[in-house]
Image: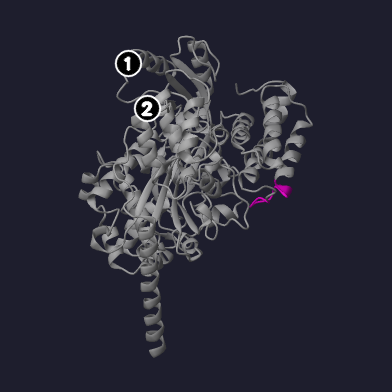
């Protein structure tokens, strides 16, 4: 009995089918499992291992490399505050101090009500809106102390539900189409393209020779 | 030098409402370049890109046409688009993926056609969740529209494309680490030789890896010809480029600028570009091309935004991101924060990078927070020298990939340009900027 819901399990299978090798789907599937559970559980990793043809240890070993994949439970809202150079120049380190005080946790921690996890992040590519913050990987900024407090209030009050899905949901849009071509068709098309090209090369040689 | 006027290329749709939808894309010249490309021979499309002298927009600045020409012929080969933009202060691909995903898809199809590839992957940085959603929607629309899948626009050419998410690792912007990640592994860069992607790439097959902004130029190049692109800019810095401006400027943001015709001063001070330094303060230093690049000072302000000129002056245009630091900036703190980034993002394979970055970071932190010793300055430089011997430019490499040799840039710049600040931190036992 799989841990992933039946519907999600089927969706995972369709993602695996997009790749020449099943293991390529490992990270997309980790995201999808996080979308269901909010973090990457051991049970989900067992399913992913089965779906991609590797061991659960290989899934864990791979996932642990990546900042976005959480191997432990996190809060409902993961608030990532960038303190890299562009944001730092615009006061993000001071904003982080404020955030820590406001939430009563240090970066890396989760509030006792499970509402917020605070992360000090590296550059999120929102430097024109610095200091910039991501909540469940959706952008906000530029933020000052007041703006940050307002953001927390809005999140708690559920005002941003349309913009900020629950933690772990990477994409609310699914791919609609399976691959159009089967591997044998791809091979046939490539042979055809190569033949056409060598014929063109041949013609070019003849016309160049004639000049 | 001046700010030149021209019709924008990659950014022309970015300010149009709903520019991410097929409807708006088609109403603004979308998929016309692809139709033209499909009416040409693939090698003629590649020839136009060679003529355009289009330099890769990811950071290394290698000519895209030459990269394509290096692709080993094989019945199975792949095209991978690098949208893992994570170089600090770089945010141009972020704009392109959220505001013009169809342009990326169209450019990718054109590249695939020119290269004879039948399966392409777009690797989108995981933190760009909205961008990923828009790219996925655009992909669905493109399949429905007939721009992807079997027999595209009745041309006989077929292509499948997959949007693949990253999961948060700077190193995956390095092309071989990206391929590892795409294969479902940890993002460990591969050793080159033998793993040049053009020969041994994705699944061991010949692979071209192009940056998102690079392929975003292709629809325009095909439509207007490579020569028209090369006519913009100057010399090897052809065309226009999306620059990301951040830090202490009045108008941080992205600006499409004709290469080599505009100076850093123009970019930072022109009222329609950076709009000058905030609060009328003066410039202390700026980073010309992402945090891997050595810093410049006020003396380099008149330099053109040209790949060659910046390289000759001992830095790089890199990822096209310019960070402005005004007189109130503590150089020790800035360089420490950049080193902390590298220390956190080092993949850990090579000793000089893994150990060196942490060592430099801890020493820099000690100086910034007032516990530094006078010999720490030389210690930091010595550690830098162990990662990149001689601290020359371009940097020498002791590691598998270029993350390692990027570490010394900022630290070395800060010490060379602002040694007095380091000394006062140590003497006074505190940061006088705080």
The correct choice, above or below, for B406 with respect to B214 in the image is above
Mark 1 Cα-neighbour bin, 10 Å: few <14, some 14–19, many ≥20: few
The correct choice, above or below, for B55 with respect to B278 in the image is below
Query: Where the C terminus of chain B falls, by quadrant?
Result: top right
Residue B53, percent across and down? 44, 62
Helix, strand or loop status at disc 1: loop
Q: Nearer the viewer, residue A101 or A53?
A: A53
Q: Chain of mark 1?
A: A
Sooner in the amino-acid sequence: mark 2 or mark 1: 2
Give me the C-alpha separation between circle 2 and circle 1: 26 Å
- Name the residue: 34% across, 39% down: B98
Q: Chain of mark 2?
A: A
Q: Which residue is mark 2?
A: A5
The correct choice, above or below, for B65 with respect to B386 in the image is below
Q: Is A124 on the left-hand or right-hand side of A13?
A: right
Q: Is B99 on the left-hand or right-hand side of B2?
A: left
State how many labels appear. Answer: 2
Residue A199, percent across and down? 37, 77
What are the residue bounds of the magenta stretch? B388-396
- Name the residue: 49% across, 43% down: A23
Mark 2 Cα-neighbour bin, 10 Å: few <14, some 14–19, many ≥20: few
The image's mark for residue A117 is: none
Helix, strand or loop status at disc 2: loop
Q: Which residue is mark 1?
A: A158
């Amino acid at each position: 009995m799989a841990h992933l819901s039946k519907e999600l399990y089927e969706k995972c299978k369709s993602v695996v089918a997009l790749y020449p090798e099943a293991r390529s789907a490992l990270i997309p599937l980790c995201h999808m499992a996080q979308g269901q559970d909010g973090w990457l559980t051991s049970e989900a990793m067992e399913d992913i291992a089965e779906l991609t043809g590797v061991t659960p240890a290989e899934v864990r070993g791979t996932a642990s490399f990546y900042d976005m994949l959480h191997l432990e439970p996190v809060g409902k809202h993961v608030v990532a505050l960038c303190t890299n150079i562009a944001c730092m120049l615009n006061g993000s380190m001071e904003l982080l101090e404020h955030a820590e005080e406001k939430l009563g946790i240090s970066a890396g921690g989760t509030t006792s009500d499970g509402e917020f996890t605070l992360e000090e992040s590296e550059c999120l590519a929102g430097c024109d809106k610095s200091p910039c913050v991501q909540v469940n990987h959706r952008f906000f900024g530029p933020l000052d102390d007041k703006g940050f407090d307002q953001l927390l209030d809005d999140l708690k009050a559920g005002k941003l539900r349309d913009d900020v899905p629950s933690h772990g949901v990477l994409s609310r849009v699914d791919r609609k189409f399976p691959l159009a071509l089967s591997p044998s068709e791809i091979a046939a098309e490539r042979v055809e393209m190569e033949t056409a090209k060598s014929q063109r090369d041949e013609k070019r040689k003849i016309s160049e020779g004639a000049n | 030098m001046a700010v030149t006027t021209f019709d924008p290329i990659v950014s022309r749709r970015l300010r149009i409402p709903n520019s991410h939808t097929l409807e708006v894309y088609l109403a603004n010249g979308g998929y016309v370049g692809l139709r033209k490309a499909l009416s040409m021979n693939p090698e003629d499309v590649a020839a136009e890109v060679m003529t355009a002298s289009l330099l890769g927009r990811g950071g290394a600045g290698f000519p895209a046409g030459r990269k394509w020409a290096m692709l080993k012929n094989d019945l199975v080969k792949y095209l991978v688009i690098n949208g893992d933009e994570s170089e600090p202060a770089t945010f141009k691909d972020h704009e392109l993926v959220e505001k013009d995903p169809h342009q990326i898809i169209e450019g990718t199809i054109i590249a695939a056609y020119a290269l004879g590839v039948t399966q392409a992957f777009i690797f989108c940085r995981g933190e760009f969740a909205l961008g990923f959603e828009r790219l996925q929607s655009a992909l669905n629309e493109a399949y429905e529209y007939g721009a992807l899948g079997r027999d595209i626009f009745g041309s006989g050419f077929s292509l499948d494309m997959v949007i693949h998410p990253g999961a948060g690792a700077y190193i995956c912007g390095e092309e071989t680490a990206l391929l590892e990640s795409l294969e479902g592994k940890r993002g460990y860069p591969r050793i080159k030789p033998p793993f040049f992607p053009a020969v041994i790439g994705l699944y061991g097959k010949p692979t071209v890896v192009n940056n998102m902004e690079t392929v975003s130029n292709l629809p325009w190049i095909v439509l207007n010809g490579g020569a028209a692109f090369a006519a913009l800019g100057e010399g090897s810095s052809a065309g226009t480029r999306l620059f990301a401006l951040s830090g202490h400027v009045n108008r941080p943001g992205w600006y499409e600028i004709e290469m080599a015709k505009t100076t850093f001063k123009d970019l930072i001070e022109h009222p329609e570009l950076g709009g000058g330094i905030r609060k009328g303060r003066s410039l202390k230093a700026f980073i010309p091309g992402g945090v891997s690049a050595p810093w410049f000072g006020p003396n380099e302000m008149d330099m053109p935004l040209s790949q060659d000129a910046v390289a000759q002056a001992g830095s790089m245009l890199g990822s096209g991101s310019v960070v402005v630091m005004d007189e109130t900036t503590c150089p020790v703190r800035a360089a420490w924060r950049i080193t902390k980034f590298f220390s956190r993002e080092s993949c850990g394979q090579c000793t000089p990078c893994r150990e060196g970055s942490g060592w430099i970071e801890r020493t820099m932190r000690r100086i910034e927070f007032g516990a530094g010793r006078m010999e720490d300055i030389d210690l930091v430089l010595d550690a830098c020298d162990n990662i990149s011997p001689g601290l020359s430019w371009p940097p020498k490499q002791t590691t598998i990939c270029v993350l390692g040799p990027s570490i010394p840039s900022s630290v070395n710049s800060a010490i060379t340009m602002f040694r007095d600040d380091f000394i006062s931190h140590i003497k006074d036992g505190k940061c006088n900027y705080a």
